[in-house]
Image (cartoon, rainbow, N blue to C red):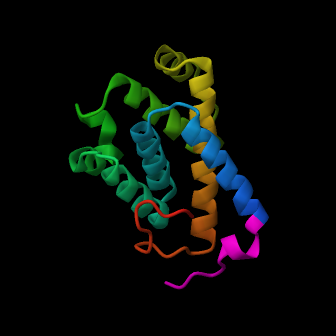
Amino acid sequence: MDQRINYSEVAPEGVRTLRGLEAYVRSAGLEPGLLELVKTRASQLNQCAYCIDMHTKDARAGGEAEQRLYALSAWRETPFFTDRERAALAWTEAVTHISHGSVPDALYQEARRHFSEKELVDLTLALIAINGWNRLSISFCTVPGTYASGDIR
C-alpha cells in the first residue's frame, strides 16, 4: 500500500484547522481514555486501519487494558465498560453512522444521563474530528503501522 497524497503537506492550513479542533477537544475536559475509546470505535466502524493503529497505540500508552481494546467492537456483549463509556460508544456509533438515520431520542436521553450538555457537544466534536481524519486517511491511503504513540499527525 502506497500513500496517494500526503495531505498534511498539500493542504497544511486545512490540516492545521482540523488539528485545532483536536486541540480543543483534548483540552475540553473529557477523559483522555474515553476519547481514545470513541476514536478507536469510530475508526473501526469506518474501517480506517491507520487510525485504528494510532488510537489503540495511544490508548495503550495511556494505560488502557488490552482486553478492553480487543473487545471494543463487541462492547455491548462485555462487562468491561462503564455506563458512561457505553453511552459514549452508543453515541459514537449513531453519530458515525448518521447517514443511516437520525440519532434516536432514547439514545440522546441516555447520553444526557451521563454527559452534561457541554460534554455531549464536546464528545460530538471529537467524533466530527475523528470521522474527518478517517476520511482523509482512507481516501489518501495513509499507511498503517507508521505511527508511534505521541506523534502529531
Give me the residue at 57% from left, 64% from top. 153
- In which image quadrant can residue 140 be found? bottom right
Give me the residue at 78% from left, 63% from top. 13
> How many marks on residues?
0
Query: In the displayed structure, would residue 24 be above or below residue 140?
Result: above
Q: Position of residue 65 (x, y in %)?
A: 24, 46
Query: In the displayed structure, would residue 74 be above or below residue 150?
Result: above
Q: Is residue 11 magenta?
A: yes
| Along the line of sight, the residue nearer the viewer: 23 or 57 | 23
Can residue 81 be seen at all in this image of the molecule?
yes
Q: Position of residue 63 (x, y in %)?
A: 29, 46
Give me the residue at 67% from left, 46% from top. 21
Horizontal arrangement in the rendering, residue 37 relative to residue 115 (left or right): left
Can residue 100 be seen at all in this image of the molecule?
no
Q: Which range is magenta?
A: 1-12
Query: In the displayed structure, would residue 77 be above or below residue 10?
Result: above
Q: Position of residue 59 (x, y in %)?
A: 36, 50
- In which image quadrant can residue 108 be found? top right
Give me the residue at 69% from left, 54% from top. 18
- In which image quadrant can residue 17 be found? bottom right
| Along the line of sight, the residue nearer the viewer: 135 or 149 | 149
Q: Is residue 5 magenta?
A: yes
Horizontal arrangement in the rendering, residue 99 relative to residue 146 (left or right): right
Horizontal arrangement in the rendering, residue 136 relative to residue 115 (left or right): right
